[in-house]
Image (cartoon, rainbow, N blue to C red):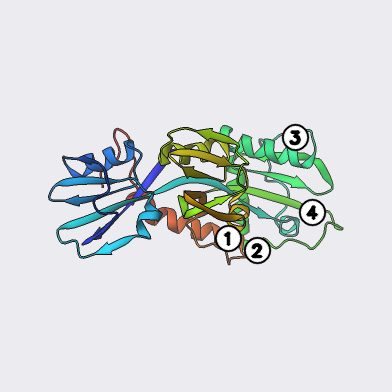
Amino acid sequence: PAPRYLWVSLHGRDADPGQDATVAFGRLPEMKRQCLEGGFEGFALHKDVAYMRRAPADELKSRLQDGFNDTVLFLAEEIRLCAVWNIFTEELMEKMGTDDVDDTFELPGNSQSVQEACQRACLRRGYHGYETHSDRPGWARLLSQPAAMRMRRRLSLAHVANNFPEDDVVPVRRLHFVENTLVRVRLEAFAGCDAFPGCNALVVKGASIAECKRLCLEEGFGGFVMYSGDAYFRTAAADSLRRRLVPLPGSTFYILACEEIAATEGLDDGLAKSAARREILGQLMPKLWQNCSGSIER
């Protein structure tokens, strides 16, 4: 998904003062556009001049300084509209009946390949969910929008939760609904560190932070180390990289962190998760800034 940005303004504060990558002039929306197009995530605005900062937004937050009168530090938090899956089990399906799966078809293959195919179909072809059976690993049905909406309404009326059984002794049928959610994409910075030294999946000479972040998202890298202006990428996941950090003077290790903004972590009820996601979408979507023609200037 295309990135959107939530701009945070910090009055009377700066980070990395004097370390200006470049400067920009004009109206505030134009300064924001130049910041993003230049691959930066923040700038200090002082007397109608924007002083771009090289470090990612999270790194700048860790080095905030007070006492800069007539200065506003603008930081861009990258937000993406992504898809997640909300899953409900057969017990509640039995109560609801089985007449809500019109406009669907079967897919051959094993359980994992079927789930991957169903998820791709939902994202690329506009389906709103799919159904699977634990005792039929090569079977699935894609759910059209009308079918998914009817099932959701019945779930809401039944006030059911998505509790999973401990095992699959009893055949389990699951409904997987695709839902939109906002995800914050950021880089965690660890100065003087590396992880899995020498295990280079890719090396990019003279890379910018913005280019490295894009490569992590597109190629599935968990992070990278910047050393002497060059980037060395790692394939391990974020948690594994955090555990394997080791000292490397003169370097900075960056870990890609993607976090759902809606507070769903402690919720067991699938309907409550859906409500939390809708609430955050309603609150934040009007505030998000897109760096493209026709975008809302904020």
Nearest to N terminus: mark 2 or mark 1 = 2
Mark 4: which secondary structure? loop
Q: Residue flagged by tag 3: what amino acid is it? A: Glu
Q: Residue flagged by tag 1: what amino acid is it? A: Leu
In the displayed image of the protein, which residue is found farthest to the bottom?
Answer: 266
Q: Percent from the top left, x then y, of residue 114?
A: 73, 38
Q: Is residue 253 shown above or below 11?
A: above
Q: Which residue is mark 1?
A: 271
Q: Is residue 220 shown above or below 19?
A: above
Which mark identifies residue 281? none
Instruction: Report the Cα–Cα distance between label 1 and label 4.
Output: 19 Å
On the rendered structure, is 99 left or right of 209? right
In the displayed image of the protein, which residue is found farthest to the left?
Answer: 47
Mark 1: which secondary structure? helix
Q: Residue flagged by tag 4: what amino acid is it? A: Val
Q: Residues within 10 Å of mark 1 (few under 14, many from 20)?
A: some
Q: Which residue is mark 2?
A: 161
Instruction: Report the Cα–Cα distance between label 3 and label 2.
Output: 27 Å
On the rendered structure, is 44 left or right of 181? left
Q: Nearer the viewer, residue 119 or 189?
A: 189
| Res. 38 in view | yes
Q: Which residue is mark 4?
A: 172
Which mark identifies residue 106? 3
| Res. 182 in view | no
Q: Residues within 10 Å of mark 3 (few under 14, many from 20)?
A: few
Q: Percent from the top left, x then y, of residue 89?
A: 72, 56
